[in-house]
Image (cartoon, rainbow, N blue to C red):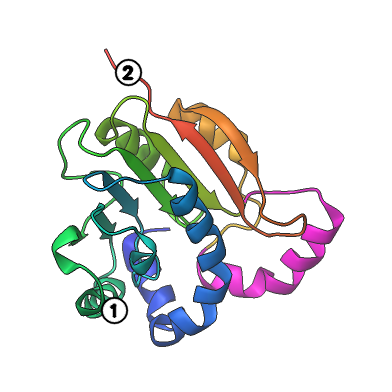
Amino acid sequence: MDIQAIEKAYSRYVKIYDAVFGRMFLPRLRHVIEKLALSPGQIVLEVGVGTGISLPLYPAGVRVAGVDVLDTMLARAKAKLPGINARSVLLAKMDGRRLAFKDNVFDHSIVAHVVSVADNPHEILKEMQRVTRPGGSIVIINHFRSENPASLVLLKAFGPLCRKLGWHPDFALDPLIARSGLHVEDVYKLHPVDLWKIVWTKSSPRN
C-alpha cells in the first residue's frame, strides 16, 4: 500500500482515531513502554507514531522521536505536545524505510500497527535495527495471521474495517522476520483472544 493510499484510508478516520482506536491500541503500548523500564536520558524511536496516543505514557526525562508519513496524523500528535514535556519529543514526517537518523542513535525502537500496512515492511525493520544501538529492543506490535478459533471469529468481525484501513488480515510474522534478519526473543498476546501480538527482538552488532 503506497503512501497516498494510506493517506486516503486514514483521512476518513483521523478525527475519531483517538476515540475509536485509542482504547484498542493503548493497552499494548502502555505494556511495552512499562516493560522497557526506561530511564531518564534514554532515547526511544516510535515509527508510525500516528496521533501520538502513546506520548503521555513515556516517563519524564525520556526523549522520544516519533515519525509518521501522514501530515494529518502528525498534526494531531503535535497538538498533544503542550500537555507533555514537549522539549523531550521530536515529531517528524518520515518514511520508516528511509529514516533520516544516524546509526546507533536510539536505545530502543517501537513500531506499532504499521508493518501490515506498509510496502516492504522488512525494510522498516532493517532501518530500525540500523538506528538502534546494539542490545536495544526493537518491539513490533501488530496483527499477524492466527489459527486460533476465537481470534478468527474476532477477525471476521473486524475484517471489513481492517481492509478499509489497508491492514492485511492474513499478514504472516515468520516471513517478515526472515527478511528483516531480526532475532525474535518473545512473541505473545496480552489476552488469549487479542487480535494483536507483541514481538520482542534485539538489535544486533553490525559489521
**Residues at circles 2 and 1 in contact by the CB criterion of under 8 Å:** no
Query: Where does label 2 land, which residue?
Result: 205
Quadrant of the drawing holding the N terminus? bottom left
Q: Name the residue: 25% across, 43% down.
A: 42
Q: Nearer the viewer, residue 164 or 147?
A: 147
**Can residue 122 be seen at all in this image of the molecule?**
no
Q: Main secondary structure of the magenta part?
A: helix
Q: Residue furthest bottom?
A: 15
Type of the residue with mark 1:
Arg
Where residue 104 appears, as percent x and y from the top left, is: 22, 31
Q: In the rendered structure, does residue 115 fall within the stretch colored magenta?
A: no
Left or right of 173: which side holds 14?
A: left
| Viewer-closest of 101 and 45 | 45
Q: How many marks?
A: 2
Label 1 packing within 10 angstroms: few (<14), some (14-19), many (20+): some
| Residue at which label 1 appears | 76
Measured Cα–Cα span from mark 2 to mark 1? 36 Å
Residue plotted at (33% across, 62% down): 3
Name above or below for residue 118 compared with residue 73. Answer: above
Toward which corner of the image does residue 37 lie, by quadrant? top left
- Is residue 183 depicted above or below 172 in this figure? above
> Which residue ends up furthest to the top in the rendered image?
207
Quick check: 65 above or below 71?
A: above
Amino acid type at image mark 2: Pro
Q: Which one is nearer the viewer's eye here, 143 or 108?
A: 108
Instruction: List x then y, in percent, for residue 73.
Output: 31, 73
**Residue at 86 percent of width and 56 percent of height:** 149
